[in-house]
Image (cartoon, helix red, strand yellow):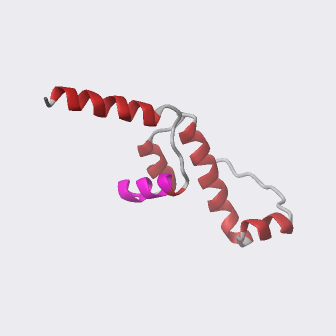
């Protein structure tokens, strides 16, 4: 089931965003998906499903949106250090 939401967006905001009114539904969906991903509410796979993207397109989308989870960089660095210790 999907929810339909109707909002009024001032022309000045559309102009500032550089988008046409018909682009607004997709832009809004993408913004909500990014927020949910950053908060850890949805997974990488769910991002792809919601936006109908494959894994590589999802990676590119999240990178472009700078949608990184808090602590993700630190976890990656710790994992990398662990792998380096194991490989010695």
Out of 45 and 65, give the one closest to the viewer: 65
Residue 2, percent across and down?
61, 48
Q: Residue at x 49, y 57 (%)?
A: 61
Q: Which residues are magenta?
A: 53-63
At 74% from the left and 70% from the top, the residue drawn is 21
Q: Nearer the viewer, residue 17 or 53?
A: 17
Residue 76 at x, y percent in the picture:
37, 35
Q: Main secondary structure of the magenta part?
A: helix
Figure quadrant of residue 30: bottom right
Left or right: 79 in relation to 3: left
Residue occupying image coordinates x 86% and y 63%: 10
Q: Position of residue 43 (x, y in %)?
A: 46, 39
Left/right of residue 22 with respect to residue 70 in the rendered view: right
From this view, report whether residue 23 is shown above or below residue 75: below
Q: Which residue sits at x=58%, y=47%?
A: 33
Q: Is residue 35 visible?
A: yes
């Amino acid at each position: 089931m999907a929810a339909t939401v109707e909002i009024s967006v001032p022309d000045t905001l559309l102009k500032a965003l550089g988008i046409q009114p018909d682009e607004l539904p997709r832009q809004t969906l993408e913004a909500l998906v990014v927020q949910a991903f950053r908060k850890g509410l949805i997974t990488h796979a769910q991002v792809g499903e919601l936006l109908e993207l494959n894994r590589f397109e999802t990676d590119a989308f999240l990178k472009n949106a700078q949608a990184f989870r808090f602590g993700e960089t630190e976890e990656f660095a710790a994992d990398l250090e662990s792998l380096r210790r194991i490989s010695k």
